[in-house]
Structures are given as C-alpha cells and as structure tokens.
C-alpha cells in the first residue's frame, strides 16, 4: 500500500476516534465539568488532524481560510489540558477565559491582518502586511506554542504531584483516586506536540506513521479513562504551610492526648476495616481538625495517612492469614476482611511492608508448619 494513503488512513482513523470519544464523553451518563472539558480537548486534537489532512490532500486554499481557527486550536491545547487536570483532581476554578487570552489575541491579530490584506490596494503595503502575517503565524506556531506548552505542562505535573501528596494524606485507599493515568495523559500530550513539530519538519513517512499510530493509541487510552473518571473529592486544610508546621508542638498536652485517642480509636473501634475511610471521617470521630491529625500522623508516626491505616490492615491480614480457621478464604477475601478495597491494593501494600506477597507469606509461615 502506498505510504501516502497509509498515512492518511491512520490520520483519518485517529480523527474519527477523536470525534467518537468526544461525543461519548460529552453525552455520557456521568455528568461533570471535567468530562466536558476533555471532550473539547479531543475535539481540538481532532481539529488539528483535520487541518493536516486538508493540507495533505492539497487543499491549501481552505487551509488559508481556516488558519485563524487553526491558530486558536493549537494555542488552546496546553491551557485546556491544564484546566482539565485541575478539574479532575478536584480543584475548581471559574475563570476559564483568562487562560485563552493568548489564542484569542493571535486569532484577532490574524483576522485583522487578513482584513487589511483584502482592503489595501497598494502592492508594497500589501506585501508588508503579508510579511507581518507570516511572521505572526511563525511566531505563534513556534516560539509562543513552545513556551506556552512548557509552562502548562509544568503546571500539570505540579498539580499531579500535589494531588499524589494530598491523597496519600487524605484517603486510606488509592483505587480510583491516585490518577496515575494522568501521567500517561501528560506524557502522551508531550509526544503529541513533539510529533506536531517533528512529523512536519522531517519528511519521513515512518515518522508520520509513528505519530498518527501513537495519537490513535493516546486517544483510546485517554478517552477510556475520561469516560470512567469522576472528579476527586478534595478535603480542605490538610497540607500545612512550613511556617505553620514549625509552630506546632507535638509534645503539647493537646497532641499527646490526640495521639492516645487516635490509637485507642483505631484499636478498639477497628476503623481501619472501613475500606473507604478518609481523614475527614477520622478527624470528625476525634473531634479535631484534619490538618492537625495529618501533621500528627506524618511527624509522630513518620507515615502518611494511607500508610498509617494500612499498617493496621496488614497486621489484621497477618492474623487472618495465620489463622487456621480462615484457610478456606481466598487471598482477596482476606484482603477485604482486613479493610482493603481490592486484591491488587492488598498485594501492593502487603509487599511494601513485609517484602512478601500474601501468597508468599502463607507459603513461608503457614506452609512451613
């Protein structure tokens, strides 16, 4: 098959995937703002692919007409991805228009230059306008595009790192809240923007094939997760400023009593058996502020919240695994009875603490008897 047509088939398939997933996500039964944002994000990627298809088929005349819109689309990708990540991890912001100032500025400038080019009749002045237009487009698609994306990708990674720290000190589980797939989403976007540059600078059909194939995989992967992911509940006041931490005296009567109450509550009421336990529920039980409780767990026990709760769950799991009356239970059932939400979460947490999987633990300590 001719490489030109294979490239077009791949790009056309990627375009169709963008449109299909965008529609599925937008009209999904799970209604939330972040899904609609990602639906628009996929539409923007699809618009870029459509524009390149037009150029590949020699329709430069249409490409010129759509150039202002293409500039808006390309310069909106980074801001929209960042805004989507911000919404998924639970941070709310109503000021969406501010991040699109640069795309709208270039759109307006290009429209004005297009208009002047049509109005002006003097050839020398028209030539100057065309030159300015070319430089504006080149500036927007190169330097501005690069700087803008570096800035928003950096902000995306910062949001993700902050979220990972937050959930480890907020939830006693990581299933569906750790959002590790967001890393793939961001790295996939980095490949996408690199591909935009390289695939159209290097005249090599293999680079086109690789680019469009990866985009197709990227759309399917990110589209699936966007369909199934709801925004994460975020608790306020958990992360303290450094100056606040320094002012907290863990040897004060308040924190000494809080530590005693915490241990008593965990051991006597076995709250760790609740697989959806979060720091807000625990702080409410202790009638304290969740930021104080988080600080106590982090500094006094040298653990984050999820590790602290899992230490009790793993101790419980060890008892059950060694209990001869429980040998008829599966590993997954043992994990569930110990407070873990899933078998995979149980295995990961258990191995992290004991350096053995639950199955290996049974073989070593039960099978040896």
Image (cartoon, helix red, strand yellow):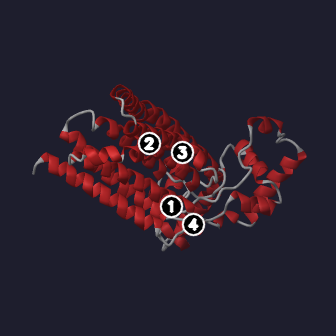
Q: Position of residue 173 (x, y in %)?
A: 59, 58
Q: Are marks 3 and 1 in contact (CB under 8 Å)?
A: no
**Element marked by disc 1:** helix
Q: Is residue 356 left or right of residue 273?
A: left
Q: CA gap, disc 1 to disc 2?
A: 31 Å
The reply to whether residue 218 is in sight is yes
Say which quarter of the image contains residue 88. Answer: bottom right
Q: Which residue is mark 4?
A: 320
As drawn, the residue found furthest toward the left would be: 1
2 vs 4, front mark: 2
**Element marked by disc 2:** helix
The reply to whether residue 52 is in sight is no
3 vs 2, front mark: 2
Q: CA gap, disc 1 to disc 4?
A: 42 Å
Q: Which residue is mark 3?
A: 100
Q: Position of residue 174 (x, y in %)?
A: 56, 56
Q: Earlier in the sequence, mark 3 or mark 2?
A: 3
Q: Which residue is mark 1?
A: 35
Q: CA gap, disc 2 to disc 4?
A: 71 Å
Say which quarter of the image contains residue 335. Answer: bottom right
Q: Residues within 10 Å of mark 4 (few under 14, many from 20)?
A: some
| Viewer-proximal residue among 91 and 365 | 91
Q: Residues within 10 Å of mark 3 (few under 14, many from 20)?
A: some
Q: CA gap, disc 3 to disc 1?
A: 19 Å
Q: Which residue is mark 2?
A: 111
Name the residue: 53% across, 46% down: 82
Q: Is residue 87 left or right of residue 20?
A: right
| Viewer-proximal residue among 182 and 15 | 15
Q: Is residue 77 left or right of residue 280?
A: left
Q: CA gap, disc 3 to disc 2?
A: 17 Å
């Amino acid at each position: 098959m001719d490489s030109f047509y294979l490239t077009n088939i791949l790009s056309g398939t990627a375009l169709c995937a963008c449109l299909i997933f965008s529609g599925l996500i937008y009209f999904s039964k799970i209604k939330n703002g972040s899904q609609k944002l990602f639906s628009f994000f996929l539409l923007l990627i699809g618009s870029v692919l459509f524009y390149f298809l037009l150029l590949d088929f020699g329709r430069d005349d249409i490409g010129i007409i759509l150039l202002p819109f293409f500039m808006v689309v390309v310069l909106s990708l980074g801001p929209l991805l960042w805004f989507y990540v911000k919404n998924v991890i639970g941070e709310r912001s109503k000021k969406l228009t501010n991040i699109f100032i640069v795309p709208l500025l270039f759109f307006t400038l290009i429209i004005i230059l297009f208009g002047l080019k049509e109005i002006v009749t003097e050839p020398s002045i028209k030539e100057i306008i065309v030159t300015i237009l070319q430089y504006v487009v080149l500036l927007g698609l190169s330097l501005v595009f690069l700087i803008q994306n570096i800035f928003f990708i950096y902000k995306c990674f910062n949001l993700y790192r902050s979220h990972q720290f937050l959930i480890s000190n907020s939830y006693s589980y990581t299933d569906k809240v750790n959002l590790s797939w967001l890393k793939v989403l961001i790295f996939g976007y980095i490949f996408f923007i690199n591909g935009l540059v390289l695939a159209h600078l290097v005249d090599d059909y293999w680079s086109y094939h690789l680019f469009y194939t990866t985009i197709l995989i990227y759309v399917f992967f990110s589209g699936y997760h966007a369909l199934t992911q709801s925004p994460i509940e975020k608790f306020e006041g958990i992360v303290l400023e450094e100056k606040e931490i320094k002012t907290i005296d863990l040897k004060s009567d308040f924190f000494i009593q809080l530590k005693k109450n915490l241990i008593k509550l965990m051991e006597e009421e076995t709250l760790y058996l609740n697989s959806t336990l979060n720091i807000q529920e625990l702080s409410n039980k202790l009638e304290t502020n969740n930021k104080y409780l988080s600080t106590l767990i982090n500094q006094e026990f040298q653990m984050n919240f999820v590790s602290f709760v899992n230490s009790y769950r793993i101790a419980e799991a060890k008892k059950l695994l060694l209990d001869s009356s429980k040998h008829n239970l599966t590993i997954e059932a043992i994990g569930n009875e110990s407070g873990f939400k899933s078998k995979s979460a149980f295995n990961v947490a258990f191995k992290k603490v004991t350096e053995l999987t639950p199955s290996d633990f049974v073989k070593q300590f039960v099978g040896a008897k």
